[in-house]
Image (spheres, helix red, strand yellow):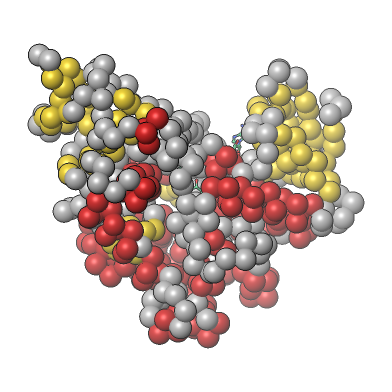
Amino acid sequence: MANRQRYNTCVVGAGIAGLNALFVASRYLREDERIVLVDRRDRAGGMWLDTYDYVRLHQPHEFFTAGNITWNLGKERGHLADKAEVIEHLQHCLEGIKQRVRVTELFGYEFEHAEEVDGTVRITCHSEEGHETTIEADRLIKAYGQRIETTEALKLSSERARSISPDDVDVWRSEMRASDAPVLIVGGGKTGMDTAHALITEQPGREVNLIAGPGTFFTSRDRAFPLGLRRWRTGEPPSLVFAEWARRFDGTNEDEVANWYRRNHGTWLTPETGNFFAAIISERENQTIADGLNKVVMDYLVDVVDRNGSSEVILKSEATMRFEPGSWVVNCTGSLLRGEYPYEPYTSSSGGVLSIQNRSVTFPLPMGGPAAYLLTHLLFLGKLTQIPLYALDAEELRRNAPEYALGSTLLSLHMYNLSMMAESLSSRAFMKILSEFGLDLDRWYPLPRRLMAAGRFMRTHERDREHHKRTLDTIAERFGVTCAPLVNA
Ligand SMILES: Cc1cc2nc3c(=O)[nH]c(=O)nc-3n(C[C@H](O)[C@H](O)[C@H](O)COP(=O)(O)OP(=O)(O)OC[C@H]3O[C@@H](n4cnc5c(N)ncnc54)[C@H](O)[C@@H]3O)c2cc1C
């Protein structure tokens, strides 16, 4: 690549967020206009390239895509794609977009910084070998998304514990699979459940224990995505559930609202729950894990130590647990919203730079893809700085607030901003945007039920918006976090 190149648009990040940005850009650009796609990894796929091998999508695969690009899998609708299938589909999305617009791939390059001068964004990137490249573009989309890092093994004092990260060790095929020593899973979220499920189904009878922290509840897949004809009669289009959830939340009653959702839409296996992070699990998976676990401990792991010839687990409550020497300890303590990144707004004051990350979140459901899809439309429509969307510092809220408050706040934020968008665009433009929004989970349901849900939103969103605004203001004040429209946008 020569040292200076000119493009219409530069997208940083080739995960689901970046590919959605690219998809939308391809709807506005002419065939001869050029986009450059920068990613430090060596291909499209984002975090899926490095995560543990037994991960599976927790929503039906069709809802993990760029725009409305369809999957080529040929499997039934409810199929939960595995890691290889997800990576292949994301590559297929990139290939599909390249049919419509010229994309230059700059893989293996780290985005360093950008400055806007006279309507041009000047972007500096480095290759691993230290080769510097400057890109000039009319607009820049930083689709860092979740910035998920691979998990490290826990550092434990005991020399008799075999501490591993699921990202480093393949629990299906590794040395761990060959041994029959007990396994201690630390963390009761999605990774913990995936790990427990993989072990319990592959090696029935093996001792698997779980340290579950405060306990996590999950959305029940059976209720959110009923199969076959049941889609006509049971379940509820998720947008209706989200709207109801946001209506119930007032910025102070997170426990009450989480319990309402858990009762009506959730599934869980621990005696109590204090966490919810939008992960989905079926009743059957839940039951298989619950039946297969040897012991569930509602506490946090502090260390495993060797004392007087034996080993024990030290817990946060100061309780201890016997630890069988040679046992495996798998770190499933989670990787979402764990980083500490400098603050940046979702848009620059000119509207030429869009940034999708956790410090300035606008459309969080589910994760980075929708924000990339919806905000890139606003960018190309010249509306990014014109609509006073609320932006939440989710990293800050994660640190300052109980987990349940985070989930409900993200819901309120999503509903408020969607309403602002609906109000600020013509209904034709808004509907056109939604018509290619493949991440919209309502698409699981038959058309009449989806239309009913859409009609309900259009009828009620203005009235609900005032309530969501008060909720978000309450959250900002109560936890001292940034949750407001951008000042200079
Ligand atoms: C174990 C696990 C399981 C999950 N399962 C699901 C699931 O089933 N369903 C679901 O919807 N979500 C799931 N998620 C959440 C998931 O992270 C998101 O849904 C989604 O894949 C994240 O995509 P993204 O594009 O936002 O971020 P990423 O996939 O992380 O992509 C961001 C890209 O930006 C690149 N990048 C970042 N900074 C720079 C830079 N400075 N220079 C160059 N490149 C840069 C990165 O290399 C990366 O490729 C899961 C998360 C984890 C950790």
Q: Viewer-proximal residue, 96 or 179?
A: 179
Q: Viewer-proximal residue, 183 or 192?
A: 183
Residue at figure coordinates x 31%, y 64% from the top left: 283
Q: Can residue 330 be seen here?
A: yes
Residue at figure coordinates x 53%, y 85% from the top left: 448
* Quarter placement of the N terminus: top right
Q: Viewer-proximal residue, 194 or 145?
A: 194
Residue at figure coordinates x 61%, y 58% from the top left: 65
- Residue 120 point in image, percent of width and height: 79, 38
Question: Which residue sits furthest top?
Answer: 308
* Image quarter where ligand 1 lies: top right
In the image, is 260 to the left or to the right of 12? Answer: left
- Residue 205 point in image, percent of width and height: 25, 46
Q: In the rendered image of this protein, does residue 226 appear above or below residue 32?
A: below
- Residue 401 point in image, percent of width and height: 29, 44
Question: Which residue sits furthest right?
Answer: 32
In the image, is 132 to the left or to the right of 372? Answer: right
Q: Quadrant of residue 332?
A: top left
Residue at figure coordinates x 69%, y 29% from the top left: 109
Q: Can residue 402 be seen here?
A: no
Q: How many marks?
A: 0
Q: Quadrant of residue 257?
A: bottom left
In the image, is 257 to the left or to the right of 243? Answer: left
- Residue 22 point in image, percent of width and height: 71, 51
Q: Quadrant of residue 30?
A: bottom right
